[in-house]
Image (tube, coloured by chain):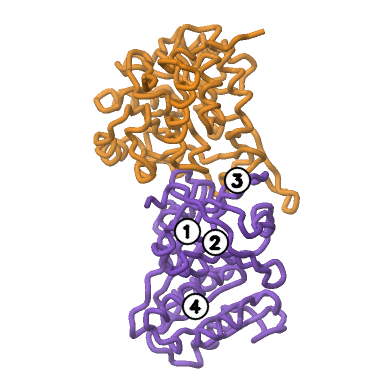
Chain colours: A orange, B purple
Amino acid sequence: MTPNLRVTIAGVELANPIMTASGCCGYGEELAEAFPLSKLGALVTKSITLKPRLGHKPPRTAETASGMLNAIGLANVGIDQFIAEKIPFLEKQKTRVIVNVAGSSAAEYIEVCSRLNDCPRVDMIELNISCPNVDEGGIEFGINPSMTERIVADVRRVFKRPLIAKLTPNVTDITVIARAAEAGGADALSLINTLIGTSIDINTWRPRLTNNRGGLSGPAIKPVALAMVDKVYNCTRLPIIGIGGIATANDVVEFLLVGATAVQIGTALFIEPDAPVKITRDLTAYLKAKKLGSVRELVGKVRKY
Amino acid sequence: MNRYTPERAPVVSLRHLSCDYYSLRLGPWNRVAQCRPGQFVHVGLPRCDVYFRRAMSIAGVDVARKELEIIFKIFGKGTKALSRLRKGDVLDLLGPLGVPFQPPRKTETCVLVGGGVGFPPLYFLASWLIERGFDPKRIEFFYGGRTSGEIVERSRIKSLGVRFHPVTDDGSFGAKGLVIEAVETYLAEHALKRPRLYACGPGGMLKAADDLALRLAIPGQVSLEAPMPCGFGVCLGCVVPLRAGGHARVCREGPVFEIGEVLL
């Protein structure tokens, strides 16, 4: 018998627990050329802001040991063009659509999310309160519990479908922020966003990113992400979407065992655009080998010492 | 056959050319017949401490043998790892990716301007055109390098039957000076019939080529290089500013751009 991969996040059923991570798949158009998006549990778009943004000057990515730094700077088409040009494409895709939203003020988050409330195709919103690469907004909301609670509550009032808060690891205690998001009315949490880092060219003495710093992602951050998912799972009742260096089905299993209900694949897409297809296939094989009927049987089942 | 999914490509041979230049032949690779001059493959390296793929322009294809050739120079750890490959090692490639060169009209004269490691896609363009009946005498192949050792594969270029114009900074092979100066002088002294410029090379050379073509109102294209994490348009790491405003992705809207299109 084929194991059941279906999972439910805040009442929204997903075909499998594999999502793309924001900023790693654009608005889905390019990825759809690599594999049918129906293979995904959900597609998470690049962060959308009120106005279009060009992002930072290049170079805005750098390779690191088992990972990468990026400081793209929230380059995106803005909410108007997103609704006019990207939603029609997403309408045709047979997967759940989660739109990631970023802003530099509460008013901007509220405006963008209320516009998305009028797009029935948008199944959920993921609030980016954790981007380390812009001066204003973003992470400013995500490192302060009272601001986290307030922004989630503000958006909660204008967006009537499930709301995910995406958390930053760049805090002293992520559980404080997780509980603040829960208090504000978030339906789920996704974690972790990138870790702040940088890299310097020893010949030019310049940082490898024009933003001077960026966000670290890729396999290098997986242990950090796993530990944070574990901590958050033990302090909240909200479903958790695990993110951080996931590249294989084994990685997915680890995240589920520490409490994630679903996961997002990010940087691995840059190396293998069709990674989600392989991961889903290998996850099915793992469940079969372990004689498990459903992927849900793994969630939170880590056998701790 | 989906060019956005990885496909295995065994190493056929690795040949040291000169200085830090190598020729790598890969195959059989199932997508060789789809490759066009100006396109690139995104090369996944075997287990080593190189995380990203490496974007490599295609230097040539042998459709019958399903082989493709990459010519590269050692710059960093990715190309260093490529230079240590052995016959039988297996890479996996995405591609062919990017927009190819727009071929010239039959009545035009091609002015190819390659600088350093920018020459391989131009070599592919020249051989591809000639195979399809383009008169090699109407291909002016300018190739600049710092010294003689940087002008690689000269006998192969000559054997195409093109008009070959090597240029070196130190005059150790061909004309002395910068390749763009040589192009400008040549264009001033020869009334070429409907010239069309194709340039690929370092940033300064490309800017000079772009400026020259705009000044002389010569149509053509430049091929850009950029650090490229994903290679298929999603990471937005490889963008360049456009003259008309906004950004373009080198991997997706490029690597080949029209003269004057990019703010170089």
Do tags 1 and 3 sit on the same chain?
no
Classify mark 4: helix, strand or loop: strand
Crowd rating for badge 3 (residues with CA inside 10 Å; few <14, some 14–19, many 20+): some
Measure the alpha-carbon separation of dots 1 and 2. 7 Å
Q: Amino acid at mark 3?
A: Thr
Q: What label does residue B88 carry, if any?
A: none
Q: Amino acid at mark 4?
A: Leu
Q: Dot 3 falls on which chain?
A: A
CB under 8 Å between discs 1 and 3: no
Q: Is residue A131 visible?
A: yes
Between disc 2 and disc 3, the foreground one is 2
**Residue indicated by mark 4:** B112
**Residue indicated by mark 1:** B29
Earlier in the chain: of badge 4 and badge 2, it is 2
Measure the alpha-carbon separation of dots 1 and 3. 38 Å
Q: Nearer the viewer, residue B206 or B101?
A: B101
Q: Amino acid at mark 2?
A: Leu
The residue under the point 46% across, 77% down is B127
Residue B90 in the image: x percent, y percent?
58, 52
Q: Is residue B73 above or below residue A218?
A: below
Between disc 4 and disc 3, the foreground one is 4
Q: Dot 4 falls on which chain?
A: B
Classify mark 3: helix, strand or loop: loop
The residue under the point 55% across, 81% down is B157
Crowd rating for badge 1 (residues with CA inside 10 Å; few <14, some 14–19, many 20+): some
